[in-house]
Amino acid sequence: MKSDIAIAREIELQRIEQIAESIGLPPEQIEPYGRHIAKVPLSYIDEEKVKKNNLILVTAITPNKAGVGKTTVSISLALGLNQIGKKAIVALREPSLGPCFGMKGGAAGGGYAQVLPMENINLHFTGDFHAVTSAHNMITALLENYIYQNRNTCEGLSEILWKRVLDVNDRSLRNTVTGLGAISDGIPRQTGFDITPASEIMAILCLAKDFEDLRHRLENILLGYTKEGQPFLVKDLGIAGAIAVLLKDAVKPNLVQTTEHTPAFVHGGPFANIAHGCNSILATKMALSFGEYAVTEAGFGADLGAEKFFDIKCRESGLSPKLTVLVATLRALKLHGGVAETEIKAPNAEALRRGLANLDRHIYNLKKFGQQVVVAFNRFDTDTEDEINIVRNHCAEQHVGFAVNDAFAQGGKGAVELARLVVEMVENTPSQPLRYAYDLESPVKAKIDKIAKDIYSAGSVVYSSKAEGKLKKIAMQSLDNLPVCIAKTQYSFSSDPKAKGDVRDFELKVSDIIINRGAGMLVVIIGEIMRMPGLPEEPQAIHIDIVNGFIEGLS
Amino acid sequence: MKSDIAIAREIELQRIEQIAESIGLPPEQIEPYGRHIAKVPLSYIDEEKVKKNNLILVTAITPNKAGVGKTTVSISLALGLNQIGKKAIVALREPSLGPCFGMKGGAAGGGYAQVLPMENINLHFTGDFHAVTSAHNMITALLENYIYQNRNTCEGLSEILWKRVLDVNDRSLRNTVTGLGAISDGIPRQTGFDITPASEIMAILCLAKDFEDLRHRLENILLGYTKEGQPFLVKDLGIAGAIAVLLKDAVKPNLVQTTEHTPAFVHGGPFANIAHGCNSILATKMALSFGEYAVTEAGFGADLGAEKFFDIKCRESGLSPKLTVLVATLRALKLHGGVAETEIKAPNAEALRRGLANLDRHIYNLKKFGQQVVVAFNRFDTDTEDEINIVRNHCAEQHVGFAVNDAFAQGGKGAVELARLVVEMVENTPSQPLRYAYDLESPVKAKIDKIAKDIYSAGSVVYSSKAEGKLKKIAMQSLDNLPVCIAKTQYSFSSDPKAKGDVRDFELKVSDIIINRGAGMLVVIIGEIMRMPGLPEEPQAIHIDIVNGFIEGLS
């Protein structure tokens, strides 16, 4: 089969004005970025339609290293729905340059189920990530300058929490010392960089209800504490306006098209292991404003992405999916059955059967939220019918809807079975109203406990002294009622990436809690999860190039 | 008078397709970024027209802190030329977010002589700076990863030269240590950040002849030295293709419009004090491809910007201006006459007369290059006729063309006098072919000596031991024949920002030489010039906001 980029290149794109027109968006009102991408003004969100139309969440079992193709399935389902006459729009996250040039590859889908132009979406796109990076580091520069200018006065801070971000995988930026050199070169400080998808500003962009709300959230970002122990916020620097100005375009959802010229909104991109993992509320609402069905995804496994989708994004916005699609692949299932990552392409019925425990656990969890679940089996070319039938029969036994998605190879036609199943469920047996995993009013530890035990099946939760200290700061600022955003490895229910399957009764170590007071959540760091990834021995960058005017190596 | 942004807001912009059409650019061939900005494919450069049409350089006397309005005069001249029936296009640099949020303000002109939409041009624009930042730091990440992955092998580097960049004024990033923490967090290293306009990649973007040449220059960036003392280049990492891909759109010039709807190309933005200070060769050639006259600027005073414009940009591209316009203001002249920065708005004829020595010195220097020079007196509202006449009469005595530019207050009509003078000179007594300040074949020290003594009037040049070491590395790599790019304070001919006027016979200290092997130049650091600026006590960011949907505080 052809590479993603070769397929992308063969498709003659429609001008973005045409795509806009196809959903009733006046072409002269969109803001084009090149011929095939546009930003859409926020005024086109229609809250009536947001309430009326059908939101579908796509999530996944615990993934293997290459991923299970959740973005591909999301796009596939939208294609399939359009194939059977439903007006469907997919709402996705934007890819980060870090993984694109590192290991995992882009995030624009694959095969005949892509959002296009994938070369632009996977590179700078409309500059949203760069705007977030710029806004984040501008705050740091202004904060450092405040401290520097006040170095001989009584003003100043006793503790700085705010760091910097870059959209790159660079392990050597995790822990840094800045401000070295002469006195005029700033105040020496131990600090570091996170990757841009972990920036609180990325979370704010994805949770903001409108521009005013964005500005308001920026104002409340916690930067550190004064010498009197009081919280020091962005508004104390008087720069929320300037930072909001840097985000004035980034806040608008981006419109692109799929391989079959159906509309797609791609906007915002926090990772689900180190941040809340969902595209923007505004883009999801935009998709619901123009699509009878809006298909959206939440990053990594359902333990991470879906939980945060429900407990953070849906609670914040009032959104509630009619159905959850749980993506599974033979490869990931075999991994959970004990097969090594290098061997997962080979048939192994026994391991596959063992691995189904991971699938079952995710189904069980999703139902706790009140969700109806269907399993989308994402087909790869090496998959055998015998193996597929093992999963099909298992789902039948469990009374869970099952459909094979073959849109990667066949486009929308390959997702018709899945689309029909989804429509049947939504029309006849939609999900119940959302039941969140925890109440906002519970104490912070109780909230973490709920997720740890009810979703991850942990036996116990322990806190580092650093985390205990943070809990005191949270109480002092009366921020106990914020939702929690767990940062944890995506490769296991536990914090041990090697513990596959349906691992249970482990100890979960909370090593730190980062107060995202502006975004409105508490980021709970579990174990040694890194908020700045590193690069592998052979980074993908080595394979990226332009050959005869065509980009190679993006996927 | 109204603020720049208030004026900008009043002007009803034409759609960028209309602007393109007005110069014969097929509207469907441009790549829009919103409704008023577009990138233009490189294929529209017409080398015949580049040779035939008239290039005008706008440079300045040694500036005061607020600048002398060189960008405003460049735009003014283009407006004035269009007013008198000449097809003129201005080609400018892009502003950096650092100064925009720091002190100096944007770089989109002022009053009724601006390029628009100034809010976008002064913010993220088409993302070119972000692409440069991203490309630069991606190289660093891949380099650090190479070193990390090879930490237990014989491969590896004995010296790393390549740092990082951010488009922000942040003194605390000048000197950093990275790679702290655990072994898996990289190799500890003393390093730092420059501002993006000082990135070698910015220089490459501005000097590239086409995409192939860009890629070739990227390949040759010097990152450090191997344990055997051999140069280690980007091509040794095998990532030039990936980095070129990150710059595939950034390399295309940006088309915008002036306050009078004439076309403008705004592209690339190295600073002239810490880099070579000119917009891209490609944008200048694009302007010449569509304009009978192309007006371009070189940053800061003529000692910095114009020298590098001639010796680096023109030599590299074959461009040769028909005329140089030297911008002077009463304020800057009085500063050179010994008046304090805080007093320069008050009339002071005596100081003004003394300050003319700075003007004369720049005229003398420009004539050495074979340039015809006219003085553009950039009028401010507090200027008196008596004082203006002192400058006018002085220029008459010196047989140098003189014209007042009042386009800031009046738009193109205020630049008609200047435009007529320029056309008369170009048609009757154009410049001679360029005479460069030094031969490329001369030894590096001889080249620096030529600039130091012939242009700056230094008495002597001394080298730090670090710089002497670099000279050996340059010789070892046979890079002696590269042009030199002096990084020096913009506030004086000397390296002392307080030494105003026509200061002479000073000692110039070369503290370091940075080998920009990819860009093809040697950056000679004079004294304590910082390649990462700091923020002032009251940063401009405090005044930037959105009020009732309108941005305030950009200028």
Image (cartoon, coloured by chain):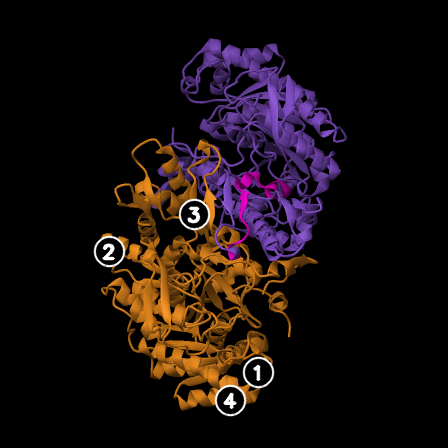
Chain colours: A purple, B orange
Q: How far is mark 1 from mark 4, CA to CA? A: 11 Å
Quadrant of res B526: bottom left
Give whichever of discs 1 and 4 has the lower sequence position.
Answer: 1
Amino acid found under the numbered disc labelled 4:
Asn
For disc 2, the marked residue is B475
Give me the chain letter of mark 4. B
**Number of the label disc, if any, that sits on residue B389:** 4
Q: Which residues are magenta?
A: A184-204
Q: How far is mark 2 from mark 3, CA to CA? A: 25 Å
Assess disc 1: are there few (<14), some (14-19) or many (≥20) residues with their C-alpha within 10 Å of its C-alpha. some
Is A198 part of what is drawn in magenta? Answer: yes
For disc 3, the marked residue is B191
Amino acid found under the numbered disc labelled 2:
Ala
Q: Nearer the viewer, mark 1 or mark 3?
A: 3
Q: Position of residue B339 (x, y in %)?
A: 54, 79
Q: CB atoms at circles 1 and 2 under 8 Å apart? A: no
Question: Is the N terminus of chain A in the top left, top right, bottom left or bottom right quadrant?
Answer: top left
For disc 1, the marked residue is B383
